């Protein structure tokens, strides 16, 4: 759900914008473009990671550049071996996973990779002292054991169906990360891995600079110098692309469309599970009211958002699962019906006041909605949501601010947020909806609390049977239609513009990631730049 960084409103926003603009004027060797060098690439991304340590969640879905997992995904999101020599052997009714490891692999500091590093990584993530917000995805793990240097055995408490998908998470070196504080040590900003790239420097707020690992087990990348320029403002990212300071960038539809017929650049559209959603905090007397929630759910025009904001590059969202996914529950679509929304509010006692804003028991149907400054898609979604809400008598005050301002307000104030994970419905829905995770960082931002949903989340997680899991997720989606603690708006396609000299590239089905580990550079180590 979390967007990793947002700018403050007003003067603070202007100050940050000036700082980003200043960075746009830097010399090519200091964060500018590659200058056409065939062995270099500079791409513009929207968000910055909190950490570069996989022990704290970095790269948990793969494509971390610096690290490898036991497994990885191909272009079609099918699992294939990485640090493992082959796919795991699954026995004991789905409760034992045995991985044979690839031999001869070394970390970038020259030390050998062994089974002990795998055990260290998983045990450290599961340690209560480790600040990893995604550790619930490894709840099924009972033990992880090294059998010699080249075999690892995971024993599970129950047959967790998507477990193999969780073994794409990066492996950290015990001989480095194990000798420092997991949450604050230097490994969080200066990591060492087995991946195709080594980190040269992380200039926070500006760029991540990588160089090819010449001894990478998969072969040294042809793109020897790879830079991710962190540019939070969409307009500035487009400006730097136009100026030749970037070789590629992620852009919103309204900025990407002008490159459609560009002779030097190619636009890529990646299908995603990435959604935009408004949190409706249970602790707010307006957004926590079931009638208000249901009225907003049918009172917002999702199709208009797809058509006007996304320029058709996406689809209407009714929950975290896209409508074209086999996990989607047919019949849970909500038709745009403002007349029905007004009736729901009328029947619940929310009556129009003198200014047109509804009231009930002296409480005005009004609440603030925060969004990420510089993110045009969030801003436009928030404004469209507020406009639709106003038509049914609900006042939504759209605001922007830093996470330092927003996070303490999340139990009471709505947020235009995002999320989505294509690998398995458990990965996104559990942390999004589980009541016990409310207030746990950016998990369950709406403090959603529904007993039937809690039970179904556990049933789906603990069953190895596809039909049983599908039934559980059907229950969740139907409950969200009855008690929508979030207003899901759209699933958005990700649009990328890249210089054609890098050839014909591919994209994967992407999570809510904004280009850090996704985009056409998901496999930059395999690019074959034209001379």
Image: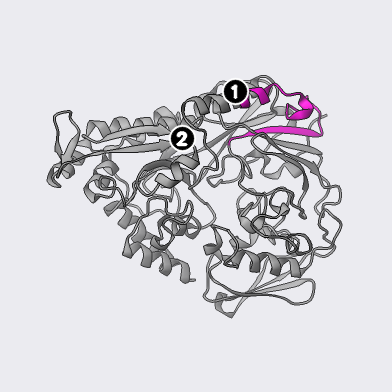
The image's colouring method is one colour
Q: Where, by quadrant of the figure, is residue 453 drawn?
A: bottom left
Residue 39 included in the magenta stretch of the image:
yes
- Which residue does the image show at 66% across and 30% down from the upper left? 248
Residues rendered magenta in the picture = 19-46
Residue 413 relative to residue 237: left or right: left
* Residue in the image at 21% along x and 34% along y: 393
**Disc 1 on helix, strand or loop?**
helix
Frontmost residue, 418 versus 311: 418
Q: Is residue 230 left or right of residue 147?
A: left
Q: Residue 298: within the magenta?
A: no
- Residue 239 position within the rendered picture, expressed as x and y whole percent measured from the top left: 61, 21
Residue under label 1, please give it.
18
Q: Is residue 529 above or below residue 485?
A: above
Seen from the viewer's position, the closer of residues 142 and 408 is: 408
Q: Which residue is farthest bottom?
A: 92
Identify the secondary structure beneath mark 2.
loop
Q: Residues within 10 Å of mark 1 (few under 14, many from 20)?
A: few
Whether residue 466 sits left or right of residue 60 in the image: it is left
In the rendering, which numbered label is found on residue 254?
Answer: none
Which quarter of the figure has residue 183? Answer: bottom right
| Residue 63 visible in the snapshot | yes
Q: Which quarter of the figure is the C terminus placed in? A: top right
Q: Are discs 2 and 1 less than 8 Å apart at CB?
A: no
Q: CA distance from mark 2 to mark 1?
A: 17 Å
**N-terminal-most mark, 2 or 1:** 1
Where does label 2 land, which residue? 401
């Amino acid at each position: 759900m979390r967007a990793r960084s947002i700018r403050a409103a007003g003067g603070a926003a202007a100050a940050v914008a000036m700082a980003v603009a200043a960075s746009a004027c830097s010399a090519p060797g200091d964060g500018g473009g590659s200058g056409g060098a065939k062995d270099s690439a500079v791409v513009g991304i929207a968000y910055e990671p909190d950490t570069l340590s996989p022990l704290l969640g970095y790269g948990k879905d793969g494509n971390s550049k610096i690290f490898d997992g036991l497994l990885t995904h191909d272009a079609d999101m099918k699992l294939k071996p990485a640090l493992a020599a082959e796919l795991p052997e699954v026995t004991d009714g789905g409760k034992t996973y045995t991985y044979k490891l690839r031999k001869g692999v070394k970390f970038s500091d020259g030390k050998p990779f062994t089974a002990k590093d795998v055990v260290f990584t998983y045990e450290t993530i599961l340690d209560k002292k480790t600040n990893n917000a995604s550790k619930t995805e490894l709840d099924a793990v009972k033990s992880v054991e090294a059998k010699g240097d080249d075999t690892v055995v995971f024993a599970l408490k129950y047959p967790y169906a998507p477990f193999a998908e969780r073994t794409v998470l990066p492996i950290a070196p015990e001989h480095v990360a194990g000798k420092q504080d997991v949450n604050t040590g230097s490994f969080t900003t200066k990591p060492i891995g087995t991946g195709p790239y080594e980190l040269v420097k992380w200039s926070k707020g500006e760029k991540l600079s990588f160089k090819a690992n010449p001894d990478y087990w998969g072969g040294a990348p042809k793109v020897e110098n790879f830079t991710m320029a962190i540019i939070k403002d969409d307009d500035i990212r487009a400006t730097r692309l136009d100026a030749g300071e970037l070789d590629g960038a992620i852009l919103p539809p309204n900025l990407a469309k002008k490159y459609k017929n560009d002779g030097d650049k190619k636009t890529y559209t990646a299908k995603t599970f990435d959604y935009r959603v408004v949190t409706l905090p249970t602790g707010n007397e307006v957004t926590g009211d079931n009638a208000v929630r249901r009225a907003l759910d049918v009172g917002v025009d999702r199709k208009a958002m797809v058509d006007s904001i996304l320029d058709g590059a996406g689809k209407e969202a009714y929950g975290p699962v896209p409508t074209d996914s086999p996990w989607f529950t047919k019949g849970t679509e909500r038709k745009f019906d403002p007349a029905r929304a007004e009736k729901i509010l009328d029947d619940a006692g929310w009556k129009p006041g003198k200014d047109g804003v509804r009231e009930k028991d002296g409480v005005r149907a009004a609440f603030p909605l925060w969004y990420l400054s510089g993110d045009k898609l969030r801003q436009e979604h928030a404004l469209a949501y507020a406009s639709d809400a106003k038509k049914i008598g609900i006042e939504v005050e759209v605001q922007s601010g830093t996470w330092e301002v927003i996070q303490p307000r999340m139990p009471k104030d709505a947020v235009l947020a995002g999320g989505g994970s294509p690998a398995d419905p458990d990965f996104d829905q559990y942390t999004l909806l589980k009541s016990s995770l409310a207030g746990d960082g950016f998990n369950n931002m709406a403090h959603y609390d529904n007993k039937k949903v809690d039970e179904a989340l556990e049933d789906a997680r603990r069953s190895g049977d596809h039909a049983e899991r599908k039934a559980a997720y059907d229950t969740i989606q139907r409950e969200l239609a009855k008690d929508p603690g979030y207003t899901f708006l759209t699933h958005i396609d990700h649009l990328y513009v890249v210089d054609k000299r890098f050839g014909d590239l591919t994209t994967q089905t992407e999570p809510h990631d904004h280009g850090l580990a996704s985009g056409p550079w998901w496999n930059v180590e395999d690019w074959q730049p034209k001379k």
